[in-house]
Image (cartoon, rainbow, N blue to C red):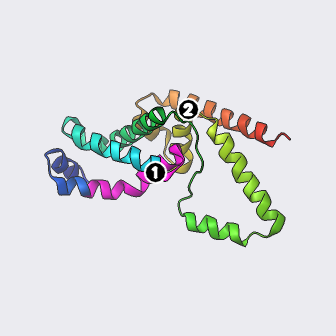
Amino acid sequence: MSDLDVERARDGDVDAFVALIEQRQEQMVRVASAILGNRQDADDAIQEALVSIWRDLPRLRASARFDAWADRILVNACRLVLRRRGRRSVREIPSSDSNDGLEAAQRVAGDDQHELTASRDAFRRAFERLDVEQRALVVLRHLEDRSIGEIAAVLEIPEGTVKSRLFTARRALEAALDREALP
């Protein structure tokens, strides 16, 4: 993505906009699916985000900030979907290649597969206990491997606040995992 592509899209060039979105499509699906927990909700959030991005693009002042700006719109769209649906659960966190995970799970035999399934279920339930802000932080940092600076730009908060909230989110996830481990 170049600043020129963003400028062209900002000036109303639909083809430039489509090219920008095609470059980001997989990442958008990954983030929204991880935060919301299923593809249908993720698709809803992505659709809302795309409409907002297109509508608000002429007001974007710095083309170089397009990625962070678009990510912020996506995270906000995820919040809206959760609020509208009255649901705060996440049923799955997809890997970067879901077929690899499925094949690996199929290779695991007997008790090992049961332990793997139980471990994934425990993590899923623990992740469900996080609020949407904590989920977004964990997803952006650990699934998307974003830097603290990038997350700060996406969420429009200081880097120190990102570090503090990420620390709190990790602690909350650890506590939830501990609760899941209790008999």
Question: Is residue 33 shown in magenta?
Answer: yes
Residue 61 seen anywhere in this rendered image of the structure = no
Give the residues in magenta: 19-39
x and y, in percent, of residue 70 in the image: 34, 42
| Image-based side of 17 in relation to 74, left or right | left
Residue 87 seen anywhere in this rendered image of the structure = yes
Which residue shows up at 52% across the image and 50% down it?
38
Which residue shows up at 49% across the image and 46% down it?
146
x and y, in percent, of residue 108 in the image: 75, 69
Q: Can you name the residue that lies furthest to the front here?
A: 85
x and y, in percent, of residue 40 in the image: 46, 51
Q: Amino acid at mark 2?
A: Lys
Q: Which quadrant of the figure contains the C terminus?
A: top right
Compared with 20, 107 (above or below) is below
Q: Whole-Å distance between the Cαs marked 1 and 2?
A: 31 Å
Q: Amino acid at mark 1?
A: Gln
Residue position for label 2: 163
Q: Are marks 1 and 2 in contact (CB under 8 Å)?
A: no
* Front-most of residues 94 and 11: 94
SS type, badge 1: helix
| Image-based side of 82 in relation to 62, left or right | right
Q: Quadrant of residue 172?
A: top right
Give the dominant element type of the magenta stretch: helix, strand or loop: helix
Question: Is residue 136 shown in magenta?
Answer: no
Sequence order check: which comes first, mark 1 or mark 2? Answer: 1
| Image-based side of 109 in relation to 10, left or right | right
SS type, badge 2: helix
The disc label shown at residue 40, or none: 1
Q: Which quadrant of the figure contains the N terminus?
A: bottom left
